[in-house]
Amino acid sequence: MEDAASPVSPQEQIASPRRAPSQQRSRERVERMLAAASALIAEQGSDAMRMGEVAERAGVSIGSLYQFFPDKRAIIWALAERYTAESQACISAALAGVSDAEGLGQAFSELIDIYYRLFLAEPVMRDIWSGTQADKALRQLELADSRANAEFLTTVLKRLRPAADPVALETTALLVWQMGEAAMRLAISVERQEGDRLVAAYKRMALRELLAE
Amino acid sequence: MEDAASPVSPQEQIASPRRAPSQQRSRERVERMLAAASALIAEQGSDAMRMGEVAERAGVSIGSLYQFFPDKRAIIWALAERYTAESQACISAALAGVSDAEGLGQAFSELIDIYYRLFLAEPVMRDIWSGTQADKALRQLELADSRANAEFLTTVLKRLRPAADPVALETTALLVWQMGEAAMRLAISVERQEGDRLVAAYKRMALRELLAE
DNA sequence: TTAAAATATGAGTATTCCTCACATTTGCAA
DNA sequence: TTGCAAATGTGAGGAATACTCATATTTTAA
């Protein structure tokens, strides 16, 4: 029986630390918790990650874990947030200096290569983004991340094609970015050789779309 | 239907009925279980679907549920399998008669429209494919489905562009299809208007790729 | 020095998936 | 029809695991 007048906000709340660590000691422990979670996800996947195991490996009690993370998703979310912050900085830097079509082609191609290697090499990121869809907060984070990344692209596109419809450029950028992530998810789930072909084909398609018209 | 005929991988965890219903009575009950599961997924999502609730709504005991489905994923898998079978038949029919570029453009465009409407209208399918990534068996089913659908496209492409590299055509078809699903997932998670723009942009991109060269 | 705030603990609670020993129904051969 | 094995039905209970909370310890700051 659900309470119609529950105090919970209408939206799905974003998981945030139940209590921000303010002392040096607790900050270090939170780092250990995140490191332990990351390692366990790399080994077994986030679904198989057990809270008790995270606590044990971090050398803290289960209660301490819940002191700083309201629930299991919050730990995963915290890791995801770090990755998005890192990658956004990387993408922003790669696209910042682009001033012509050739430059965009070059920068975009390198960016995809970097991302692909990251997907192949980083099991934690792979797992988190794979499971993304099942979790509303993560889905929102991913969408926000996609929008942010697409915006870097949009900025470049508007510079290169000032006559084009801005809304159309935004749509294109978001779509191209989202498709890139889909292409890479597909690529890492098949044989390496086929994956490479898929990423190459995606690059060609995306560049044709970004540079054409 | 769930016999060795399906492209079952040599791996573990393909969920198959623990016991195939052989009597009319049990077949009807299994239908009720699937209907109940479908309704609950539509209402709350597959994650929130409780096995006890499925049994209750189907008017059977929890034991009966497990008589025919080895675990929770198996029910979701069974529903997913039905949807893929349906949609594959639909796609196959839509692309079967295509014999020229214009026909492909027409058929593909209509296909995307149908799929988009389906994604918008069918919460069960949406939920299942959203959560797909977290479940290996489902992920494999989705990949197999994508490959099957892409094969219909490949067949057409090979007919239209006999001089092209067959492997490249296969790659293109798989990529285009996978991107389409990504585009639609994105489209249904944003405002309707933006979603429509995204689907339209995808169509344009995909057709450019399919017909060009 | 000391009291309040922050942090740490882990046994216990709640929830949910799933099992299993036993009851009932159905198909079918005698 | 009758008998019986196979198929099907049942739900209390086992097992796993996310999460809580009363209590203990450490740190901060006056």
Image (cartoon, coloured by chain):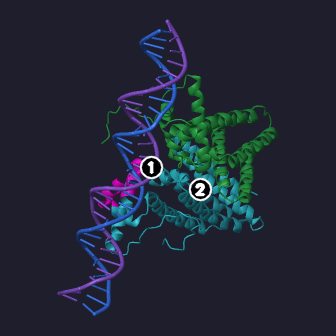
Chain colours: A green, B cyan, C blue, D purple
Snapshot quadrant of residue B57 = bottom left
Residue D8 versus residue B91: which sits nearer the camera? D8
| Residue shown at 60% from the left, 59% from the top | B108
Q: Residue at x 56, y 59 (%)?
A: B142
Disc 1 versus disc 2: nearer the observer: 1
Residue A4 shown left or right of residue B209 in the figure: left
Determine whether, in the image, residue B91 is placed left or right of residue D2.
right
Q: Which residue is mark 1?
A: B47
Outermost residue toward the right in this view: A102
Q: Main secondary structure of the magenta part?
A: helix
Kind of residue sitting beneath label 1: Asp
Residue B106, position in %: x, y? Answer: 61, 59
State yes or no: residue B89 in magenta.
Answer: no
- Tell whether B28 sits left or right of A67: left
First in residue order: circle 1 vs circle 2:
1
Span shown in magenta: B36-62
Q: Report the front residue among C14 and B136.
A: C14
Which label belongs to residue B109? 2
Quadrant, the N terminus of chain A: top left
**Considering only vertical position in the picture, is D21 above or below B166?**
above
Near mark 1 (Cα within 10 A), the count class, few <14, some 14-19 or many ≥20, is few
Most foreground residue, D2 or A148: D2
Q: SS class of the residue under badge 1?
A: loop
Foreground residue among B10 and A12: B10
Q: Amino acid at mark 2?
A: Ser
Quadrant location, the C terminus of chain A:
top right
Q: Secondary structure at mark 2?
A: helix
Residue A91 seen from this side: yes
Residue A178: in sight, yes or no?
no
